Image (cartoon, coloured by chain):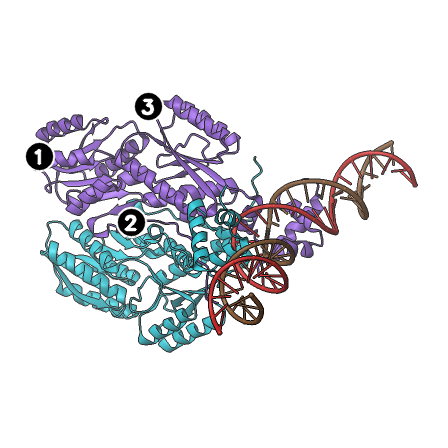
Chain colours: A cyan, B purple, C brown, D red
Amino acid sequence: MRPTVNDIAREAGVSLATVDRVLNDRPGVRPKTVQAVTDAIERIGYVRDLAAANLARSRSYRIACLLPDTQSQFLATIEQAVNEAAAAAVVSRTEVETLRFPAEDPHALVAMLAGLQAQGISGVAIMAPETPHLRDAIRALRQAGVAVVALVSDLPNTERDHFVGIDNVAAGRTAGVLMGRFLSGNCGQIMVVAQSLLSRDALERRRGFDAVVQAEYPDLEVLQTLEAHGSPDLLRRAVFEMSRHAPRLRGIYVLGSGHRVLGAALADLGLEGRVVVIGHEMTPHTRAALQAGTIDALVTQNTGHLARSALRVLRAKIDRVPIDEGQEQIRIDIVLRENLPQIIDDASPIARPKPDEAA
Amino acid sequence: MRPTVNDIAREAGVSLATVDRVLNDRPGVRPKTVQAVTDAIERIGYVRDLAAANLARSRSYRIACLLPDTQSQFLATIEQAVNEAAAAAVVSRTEVETLRFPAEDPHALVAMLAGLQAQGISGVAIMAPETPHLRDAIRALRQAGVAVVALVSDLPNTERDHFVGIDNVAAGRTAGVLMGRFLSGNCGQIMVVAQSLLSRDALERRRGFDAVVQAEYPDLEVLQTLEAHGSPDLLRRAVFEMSRHAPRLRGIYVLGSGHRVLGAALADLGLEGRVVVIGHEMTPHTRAALQAGTIDALVTQNTGHLARSALRVLRAKIDRVPIDEGQEQIRIDIVLRENLPQIIDDASPIARPKPDEAA
DNA sequence: GGATTTTTGAGGTACGCACCTCAAAACTTC
DNA sequence: GAAGTTTTGAGGTGCGTACCTCAAAAATCC
């Protein structure tokens, strides 16, 4: 049997009330007595039963997830993953609200964050570019005792508790090595496509990609980044333009969104299947393209893991318990057609539990 | 507030006792009343609080993990992962015992399994080759109400509840594509090394590898599998012998163990860095080799995920609750030097929790 | 050493649920 | 409609913890 608080009391030779005071950092206990209790805890190997503790506290976790209102398949995938993780987290008394904020309006985001605090939210997962306003807003949240994690894109200079996502420089390096190896021995040019280089993740990926190609595949020339800025047309024209001036185009690296337009443009240019395309993030479209062979490899992060990890980390931070670093490390996944994970249609993850009928 | 059993009672217009009888499938309730209660549950969206339920039942999960006593770094890694997952699972009243059984003695394994049942174990994770004896033993366990999952290597013709591991044919295909792409445009020979082709996983990988290379890279010739059978010397001699008869050796595919010997042999032959080496499983050695560049890519499964998934699935099966398929799917990881996950030295995953001091 | 402050102990209630008993109520059956 | 059976209700206890109150004991101060 696992030791309980009563066992601590007996072992330490004090009353239950004193053990309780020590366990919950309540005042009015002499240092000597505290020591006696912690010694006893150590000796009998007591581990607090979190389930019972949370039951007694009748605590529930209210968590908000803030995403930009940009329309992209990746964001939709993230939101869906968060909603699924949230549905599964109901059993552990966790309530999640996903909110979209206007991507272009930093003040709106800050106002939303301030509002959350009033609503009794105890944890926030946020995906947003770092701005001075956001830094202040996060500091305020933290000071109010709200746990904050950065999602997908880190906010290193804020006081966020944790970052849930991948090292994007390493992701870019990974894409670079794949490109280099897939084009091994060949010289040629590589086109790089992005939504915008303003976002931290895109920049970091490009940096990692360049570093590897430069150092290890000097025969490859990486062209200037084409930025779509949300306009499919602009991207399309840029691709056409550039491909005219790049006769030895052998590869295309897609830093973020833009896969759909690019795919169409490549088909029109007759380049489909003749250049190596490497991209990021798993979305319905990139998945299909990988399967069809128009994308050769994807460097991704598992959004399901991402969402579940964010919720777990927030709960841990709220409870002030340590997190399992191993479990919360998000890996950089390389996905080829051959190791594409099967789709799981998660009809109803929650069902009414049935008890154990067997002995 | 989440609805409770009392809310069901009020909503259904019955007593708490009746709700309890329905919830826990106890007899003596008219079908009409059962319907009224389930309707009420549906209406108010009641979800049983598993934490409280388990607390009330004072149930604890006793789980056994059975691994062969073969000495290999991969098995050691698995065992370590299970032990770490077990340490983290203490907080959810789960006790795990890892046991090694004699790899060559099917009867010993069966005897162990029979013994477990007597010890009040309610879940078993097992990694073993499928034999008729094992089939019977698993059936007996299941009939006694013990949950059983297969680990790493599936036992498809037994009545195991679940398989925790990857599709090894797909893993072999993945290795094949990597080999083909890394050697793109080149013709040449590929050596395949394994511990033994008797194990299901090795066979399936080889099958997947061959299928892809044959179909997509016809210029590559895959040589006969060299089997080490646990003897480093044997393997070493075989590698020397074969490399003499394979002048155009361009790649080596390592199906399972044997990386250490192979590495030494390659160095002696002066082939280090001149052939593409692709292997399976992350161990201290393969990790170092990947970092040093003597292995080019690894196709792996995350052992931490594997272990945690096995425990989660067993708990779910014991509780008769559905599992989150998305979370339990083990992915086929491709690991290059560039996306090598950082090592996390998990000194003490469990610490005494501190309560929330903030409001 | 008496008054004051600090520390400790004993006990209770609650969280949401499982599981038990006993009696009352509602149905059957002839 | 009386005797039997089945179904339902009321109530209690316990799981391990949090949090509260009040009084007793111990330490500290002047």
Q: Nearer the viewer, mark 2 or mark 1?
A: 2
Establish whether labels 3 and 2 are both on one chain: yes
Amino acid type shown at disc 3: Glu
Q: CA distance from mark 3 to mark 2?
A: 34 Å
User: Label 2: how many residues lie within 10 Å, few (<14), some (14-19) or many (20+)?
Assistant: few
Q: Residue furthest bottom?
A: A107
Secondary structure of the residue carrying tag 1 is helix
Describe the element under mark 3 as helix, strand or loop: loop
- Split into 4 quadrants, where in the image is the N terminus of chain B? bottom right
Quadrant housing residue A131 = bottom left
Residue A71 picture location, percent across and down: 37, 67
Mark 1 belongs to which amino acid?
Asp
Mark 1 or mark 3, which is nearer the start of the sequence?
Answer: 3
The residue drawn where x is 30% and y is 35% is B75
| Badge 3: chain ID | B
**How would you rate the neighbour count of disc 1 (Cα within 10 Å): few for under 14, some for 14-19, many for 20 or more?**
few
* Mark 2 secondary-structure assignment: loop
Which residue is painted at 39% across and 52% down in the image? B351
The residue that disc 3 covers is B104
Q: Chain of mark 2?
A: B
| Whether residue B216 is visible | no
What amino acid is found at the position of numbered circle 2 in the picture? Answer: Asp
Picture disc at residue B345: 2
Badge 2 and badge 1 both on one subunit:
yes
Residue B4 at x, y = what percent? 61, 55
Q: Tell me how far mark 3 sits from mark 1, CA to CA.
A: 33 Å
According to the picture, the residue beneath numbered tag 1 turns out to be: B268
